[in-house]
Amino acid sequence: MTTGSRSLLPDFCRLPRIAAVCGITQLAVILLFLSPLGVYPASMTSFLAASAFAQWLALASALLLCKAGPVLSRFSSPLSYALAATLSGMLSALAAWLVYVLDREFQYRALQHLHPAQFCLGTALMMALLSAVMLRYFYVRDQWRDQVRANAKASLQALQARINPHFLFNSMNTIAALVRRDPQTAETAIEDLSDLFRAALGDENAEATLAEELQIARQFLAIEQLRLGSRLRIDWQLQNNLPMQLRMPRLTLQPLFENAVIHGIAMLPEGGEIRVTAESDRGMLQLSVCNPVGDNQSTAGHGHALESIRQRLALYYGNSARLTTDSSNGLFCIRIGIPHAPAA
């Protein structure tokens, strides 16, 4: 059997996945009781009993698939999925039979109106079908997440490739002009350039702290300021209690400043001021970068880098992070909100 035909069963050994199984199963119970067909007597007692039984089946099935996953993964995907759903159904049939026996032995009489074969077979089929649906859902979700991760990695690699040629060319020309006139400044610029490219060409999965990201941004702006001179002005408005050890994807902030310089300041003969504001509020870092734009100036050049950052933030923080843009009153602003903790 080739590697490409091996199955990719979802991992049921993680707590978030087990919690999702329990949640989906409970939703099925709720839908069953809301059905106008009246499958069960519509009472709170019967609902709680059915919920407890369903959660028992959900947990048992998740643990069974967790343990059996490595063995089932040896088969092709269709066969392993069918076996997983069948195992879940068989386990549910056994659990239903035990519940039926206990109900009869202790004379609860809650299931006396059902034939044992009907109760066991019905429970097994329901759990098998529900398991098949959940297996497909988790598979598609995992595939989507892998695709997002791959896109984010590709976007970062594109950013790394894009930062190299033009910026390096302009920076080296600037440094060459400074070597004889101001060797100390030229040496500092070379050190800044070295740090910037070390960050840009490192591991695409690496993280950085807020302090490191701001330092990279300052070094980038220092190099650009050597080239643009008084045309480039920076107004830093940073709150004192910023979470400087906040972890984030590497090269999250530098592209924002690169856009502000290339598509804003450098396009204006008189230059302009980049206003940077950052504050921490209710567990969120709020940061904005605003730069002036000309009346007829397009902001289309911002698209690729911003979409890359948006994808990487979504991968790292889920739906908790956001990136928005606004263009008004001659200013183009990029605003990001980042939670103090990454998504699970």
Image: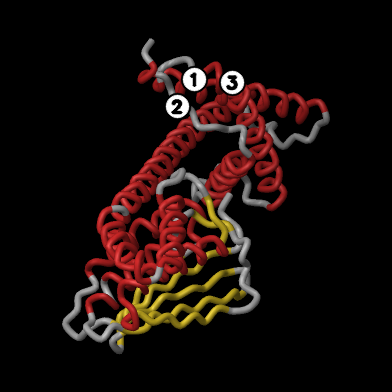
Question: In the rendered image, which residue does mark 1 sit on?
Answer: 73
Name the amino acid type tagged 1. Answer: Ser
Q: Nearer the viewer, residue 170 or 19?
A: 170
Foreground: disc 3 or disc 2: 2
Name the amino acid type tagged 2. Answer: Leu
* Apparent side of residue 164 relative to residue 313 in the rendered image (left or right): left
* Apparent side of residue 106 relative to residue 342 in the rendered image (left or right): right
Q: Quadrant of the N terminus?
A: top left
Q: Of label 3 and label 2, which has the lower sequence position?
A: 2
Helix, strand or loop at mark 1 = loop
Q: Position of residue 240 (x, y in %)?
A: 63, 78
Q: CA distance from mark 3 to mark 2?
A: 13 Å
Q: Nearer the viewer, residue 83 or 41?
A: 83
The answer to the question of whether label 1 and label 2 lie on touching residues, with beta carbons closer than 8 A, is yes
With respect to residue 28, does 56 lie above or below?
Answer: above
Q: Which residue is at 65% across, 75% downward?
A: 241
Q: Position of residue 224 (x, y in %)?
A: 35, 70
Q: Which residue is at 54% across, 55% downward?
A: 208
Name the amino acid type tagged 3. Answer: Ala
Q: Residues within 10 Å of mark 1 (few under 14, many from 20)?
A: some
With respect to residue 334, does 175 lie above or below?
Answer: above
Helix, strand or loop at mark 2 = loop
Question: In the rendered image, which residue does mark 2 sit on?
Answer: 8
* Apparent side of residue 339 relative to residue 175 in the rendered image (left or right): right
The answer to the question of whether label 1 and label 3 lie on touching residues, with beta carbons closer than 8 A, is no
Question: In the rendered image, which residue does mark 3 sit on?
Answer: 68
Helix, strand or loop at mark 3 = helix
